[in-house]
Image (tube, helix red, strand yellow):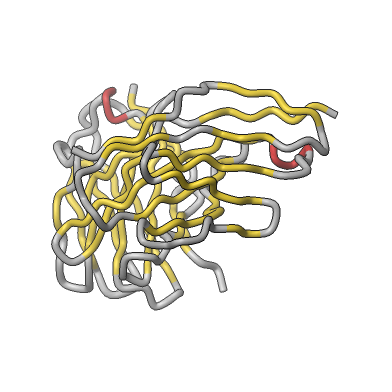
Amino acid sequence: NAGVTQTPKFQVLKTGQSMTLQCAQDMNHNSMYWYRQDPGMGLRLIYYSASEGTTDKGEVPNGYNVSRLNKREFSLRLESAAPSQTSVYFCASSLGGASYEQYFGPGTRLTVT
Amino acid sequence: AQKITQTQPGMFVQEKEAVTLDCTYDTSDQSYGLFWYKQPSSGEMIFLIYQGSYDEQNATEGRYSLNFQKARKSANLVISASQLGDSAMYFCAMRDWMDSSYKLIFGSGTRLLVRP
């Protein structure tokens, strides 16, 4: 049981390049999330998917797109990377419901130069 | 808007002693939930404990307990018998409903260092 997995773990991009961060969970969770964590701050929500087939914007969606490929997988795409997107990106999933915690992946450290 | 405030950027505690990490929150909702997560230097986010606003008793999970004071809007994490492995960043978070799911609103965190 791997929980939430993310690839890659590290990535360096040049300004204007594109890339996709992959996330998968094997806990049969309904909801999946993408957060970013900037230095000295807590996590902020980029996009989420309440259930398979739905996606919605979070607090900081500009510059990102997402795809809920199936119940297990939720990808985050940067179409044209900017230095302001240098951050650590976390994928999370939850069963759904008010009291269920979100389980986090190990994170992807992205640097845009 | 909901907000989480953690006023202690860093704290020290002696091994085997107890430590309290502060968290205050702001919400106009009657039903809400509060979470604590641990982030060690390796970077992953580890769920520690959850408290619902209607829970009458303070939540406990092993050495972790949540000192929930609703009138003061505080949800402090108490770690008893600190261990060296407790050295990490600790984040308080609040559940914020969004249609059919919820997001977590995080505080800025407290870095705890346990001294041997």
Q: Residue at x 18, y 35 (%)?
A: A80
Name the residue at 80% across, 27% down: B115
Q: Evaluate whether residue A112 shows in this view.
A: yes
Which of the pair B59/B16 is nearer the observer? B59
Location of the N terminus of chain A by quadrant is: bottom right
Q: Is residue A101 left or right of residue B31?
A: right
Residue B85, image quadrant? top right
Task: Name the one closer to the observer, B100 or B78.
Answer: B78
- Judged from this view, the residue extending furthest toward the bottom is A28
**Residue A49 picture location, percent across and down:** 22, 62
Q: In the picture, residue A92 is in which quadrant?
A: bottom left
Q: Is residue A101 above or below residue B71?
A: below
Left or right side of A20 for B49: right
Residue at the limit of the structure toward the front, as seen here: B71
Which residue is found at the position 48% from the left and 31% from the top? B109
Residue A110 can be seen in this image: no
The location of residue B44, given as percent across then percent down, is 54, 46
Residue sitting at the far right: B116
**Is B100 in front, or is A75?**
B100
Which quarter of the image is occupied by the C terminus of chain A? top left
Q: In this view of the protein, which residue sits in the foreground, A7 or B67? A: B67
